[in-house]
Amino acid sequence: MINQTKINRTVLNNGIVVITTENMVADIVSAKIFLRIGSRYEAKKQSGISHLLAAVLTKGTDKLSSLEIAQKIESVGARLGSDTTADYFLVSIKTVSADFDDIFHLSGEIIRYPSFPETEIELEKRITIQSIRSQKEQPFTVAFSQLREMMYQNHPYALSTLGRENTVSKITRQDIQEFHQTYFRPDNIVISIVGKISNEKAISLVEEIYGDWQPPTTPLPSLNLPTITPQPFIAKKYQETQQSIIMLGYLAANVSSSDYAPLKLLNTYLGNGLSSRLFVELREKKGLAYDVSAFYPTRFHISNFTVYIGTAAENTALAEAGLKTEVERLVNYLLSEEELEICKNKLLGQYALGKQTNSQIAQILGWYEVLNLGIYFDSKFQENLAMVTSVEAQQVANKYFIEPYISIVGPEIK
């Protein structure tokens, strides 16, 4: 567990939220700069724009070329990169403590004054389109894309953060500049700094770099997302592959729901590791699976609980029935006390392992802030998980595991 007494949360006059945690054990400082944007903020006709923005953000500023930026970072062995997800945009920094000031200043210049060179944009558009095409050849990705589109319909969560080929190809430099100007503003930023730096020094550094940056008088655009109407059905896509991919998907609670911890526990029970129920029953005992698992991503809006299996084409029907049986078992039967405790210990252990480095801690604290959960969610989640009972787990299963969306990709069975 992160030591809550060492976490400092400060809001600057311009709206930037700064979260700092001193950790003097290693001579490393990590910073995560979050912005409340991501693919869920994209207009449908500009799907993929936040990914392109992340790809070109570090490729030039008003004063520095892409090569000069790379040299500044690499000459001291630091790391600086940008990325986007469905729910947030992220700039990540990792340096030894002596170089943190310089690299953090560089990140400020990149965030505030990017130049978006036309040649870099065109290059990244070609790379992105090639990645989109490549994904269409990967059965797992095709199956999950098909499942997402069924489940989320017109909601942005239906699409990959890469976007679509027809939208990415039409995005212009002006589009990227306008997207940046709209959402890159101090009152939309969370900065999480963890490592060998005092809270006072970290806050002072943020003030020095960002303190003169004032938010515009216009409010942030309101996010009006379409309502998701559950309409479970089956979609099949035939590909000449060696195996079939079968996915069952269920719309599930977002991270702020009281059902979040029980669903995380059920996900661990079903599909987490070689001792999980799906692995033992469908692979070890029945020999149906090349790969089998479950996932339940943490989402700001409605999430999805998905179980999947990769199997020989001739076993498609058996594997689909096997997945349904294991999910329905959670609806019809209580987990034993032993099963419940094993799952809790496994989940809490893996959760603890995900908070060992400064970078991991900075990520978690900033992420929770962006999701409006607060800096104490780390301990709250663990407390909520510890209190989950077998009865509560079954009630949650009954609430969400009603009728699945089914996505199948594989060779046509003659």
Image (cartoon, grey):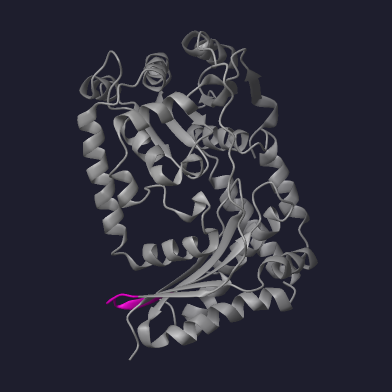
Determine if residue 102 is in view. Answer: yes
Residue visible at 61% across and 39% down?
371
In this image, 43 relative to 414: left or right? right
Quarter in which the N terminus is drawn: top right
Residue visible at 35% across and 68% down?
139
Where does the magenta region start and end? 238-245
Residue 333 shown in magenta: no
Determine if residue 28 is in view. Answer: no
Above or below — where is 144 with respect to 196? below
In this image, 263 relative to 34: left or right? right
Above or below — where is 411 with respect to 337? below
In this image, 196 relative to 126: left or right? right
Above or below — where is 382 with respect to 390? above
Q: Position of residue 81 (x, y in %)?
A: 36, 32
Pick whichever, 126 or 3, lies toward us: 126
Q: Position of residue 224 (x, y in %)?
A: 59, 42
Pick whichever, 95 or 219, lies toward us: 219
Pick whichever, 28 or 107, lies toward us: 107
